């Protein structure tokens, strides 16, 4: 298993409870794919450099996780299909 960092930008219309629910759902996707979430950091609301889907701000969340390389495509696909996730970036950490 490789170690990854996943940064997500979530809509600001969601309250804190909805953001936590979304984070749990992302964590569940990772665990059902055979991975594990090492750490979750809520960075809070920040101003975006440019408009994304008519949004000027977003809630940033950073996940550190371990996942099989074959499961990354399914995770990214589910994040792309989620309307509450404005952007995401999944990178593999070097050993």
Image (cartoon, grey):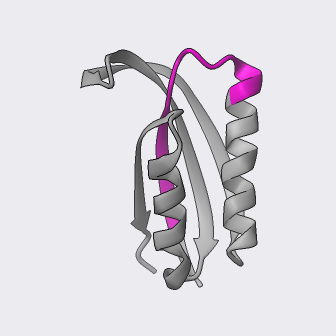
Q: Position of residue 1 (x, y in %)?
A: 59, 85
Viewer-nearest residue: 22 or 92 = 22
Q: Position of residue 87 (x, y in %)?
A: 39, 41
80 relative to 75, above or below? above
At 54% across and 45% down in the image, what residue appears? 62
Q: Is residue 90 above or below residue 81?
A: below
Residue depicted at 72% across the width and 48% down the height: 25
Pick the front one: 52 or 62? 52
Residue at the spot 41% in from the left edge and 76% down from the top edge: 94
Quarter of the figure with residue 44: top right
Number of callouts in the render? 0
Magenta span has 12?
A: yes
In the rendered structure, the answer to whether residue 47 lies left or right of residue 42 reads left
| Residue 20 to residue 75: above or below | above
51 sits to left or right of 64? left
Residue 51 in percent (x, y) is at: 26, 21
In the image, the segment drawn in magenta is 4-18
20 part of magenta stretch:
no
Point 36% across, 17% down: residue: 55
Task: Compare residues 68 and 52 and report the one nearer the observer.
Answer: 52
Where residue 31 appears, x then y in whole percent?
74, 68
């Amino acid at each position: 298993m490789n170690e990854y960092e996943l940064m997500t930008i979530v809509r600001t219309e969601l309250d804190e409870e909805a953001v936590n629910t979304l984070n749990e759902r992302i964590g569940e996707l990772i665990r059902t794919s055979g991975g594990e979430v090492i750490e979750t950091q809520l960075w809070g609301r920040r101003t975006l450099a440019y408009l994304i889907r008519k949004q000027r701000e977003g809630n940033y969340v950073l996940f550190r996780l371990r996942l099989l390389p074959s499961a990354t495509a399914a995770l990214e696909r589910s994040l792309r299909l989620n309307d509450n996730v404005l952007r995401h970036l999944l990178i593999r950490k070097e050993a």
